[in-house]
Amino acid sequence: GDAAKLHEALAAVTNLPPPSQASPAAVGDLFDRYADRFDQHLRETLGYRVPELIAAAVEQARAAAGQARPAEPMDVLDLGCGTGLCGPLLRRMAGAGLLAGVDLSPAMIERARGRGVYDRLEAADLLEALGKRPAAYDLLVAADVLIYFGDLTPIFEPAVAALRPGGLFAFSVEAGEGERFQFHPATRRYAHAEPYLRRLADIFGLRVVKLDPITGRTEAGKPVPGFLVLLAALSGGPSREAAG
C-alpha cells in the first residue's frame, strides 16, 4: 500500500533498511503501465534471454532423468508470468499437462492470454497462488521475479509445498555479493548471493541441479550478472531453519 511505497522511496535516499520485498501494489502498478511495450523493451533494448536459458536447463535436467518423453506431461506454474514470454517454451514442456500463469498485473495477464498457450491465468499475488494448490505442480518457473524480493524464505516455503516429489523449481536472480542479498535503490531490485541460495535449497530440502552464472539482460550497455537456478524437490521435507 501507500506506506510500503513510502518506505521504498525513503530507503532509496536514506539509510533506512529496505523492505523485505517490493510492495505488490507498486509492482502491479508499474507493470500495468509497462504492459504494452514490455516485450519489445526486454527483447530489443535489454537483450533479455532468461526464458530460453530456463527452458534449456529444465529440458537438460529432464533428459538426464529420462523424463523428457512427450508421453510424460508436466503441470507447470509460471510465477510472475508477465506477458507470457516464457509461455510458448513452457507449453512445449508441459505437453498435455496444465500450464498456469499468475501475475500481479491484470494488464500483463491480458497480454499473456493473447498468446493462447496458457490453460489458466490469474491476476493475483504469487504467494497466494502458490498456497492454493499443494503438491500440484511438476515445474515452477520464476523468470526475473525474485529480484523483487529480498528474503526468499516466504517464497520457498509455499513453493516447496506446491511441488510434487521430484518436481523442479527454476528461477533467475541478479547476482549479489557476500552471504545474503542486497537492495539496489537505483533499480529497486534485489541481488542474491550464491551462498544464500545454496543455504535456502538445503534448508528446504531441495537438490541443487544447476546454479550457473548468467547474463540475463543488459542495462545501459552493461551486462547484468545473474544466476540461473534449478532446484529439485526431494522426499523427507525441509529442515525449517532460518536462512539468515
Image: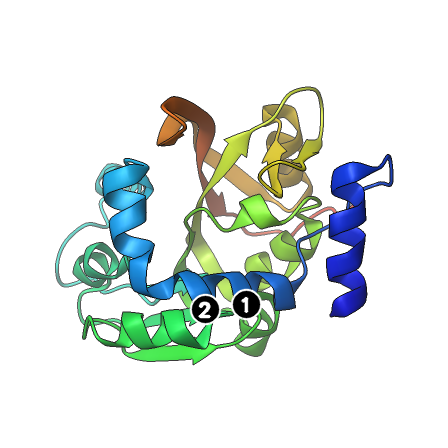
Q: Is residue 21 visible?
A: yes
Q: Position of residue 75 (x, y in %)?
A: 33, 67
Circle 1: is it few (<14), some (14-19), or many (20+) Cα within 10 Å?
some
Compared with 139, 195 (above or below) is above
- Compare residues 117 and 60 and report the one nearer the observer: 117
Q: Secondary structure at mark 2?
A: helix
Q: Is residue 60 left or right of residue 27?
A: left
- Compare residues 221 and 162 and report the one nearer the observer: 221
x 44%, y 70%: residue = 102
x 57%, y 39%: residue = 187
Circle 2: is it few (<14), some (14-19), or many (20+) Cα within 10 Å?
some
Task: Give me the disc on residue 4.
Answer: none
Q: Residue 198 sits in which quadrant? A: top right
Q: How many callouts does the rendering have?
A: 2
- Compare residues 54 and 231 and report the one nearer the observer: 54
Q: Position of residue 168 (x, y in %)?
A: 42, 50
- Most distant residue in the left direction: 70
Q: Position of residue 48 (x, y in %)?
A: 30, 39
Q: Residue 64 sits in which quadrant? A: top left
Q: Are marks 2 and 1 in contact (CB under 8 Å)?
A: yes
Task: Give me the disc on residue 29.
Answer: 1
Q: Residue 90 sits in which quadrant? A: bottom left
Quadrant housing the C terminus: top right
Q: Is residue 56 visible?
A: no
Q: Tell me which amino acid carries mark 1.
A: Asp
Residue holding disc 2: 32
Q: Is residue 36 left or right of residue 180?
A: left
Compared with 189, 34 (above or below) is below
Q: Position of residue 80 (x, y in %)?
A: 45, 61
- Most distant residue in the right direction: 16
Q: Tell me which amino acid carries mark 2.
A: Asp
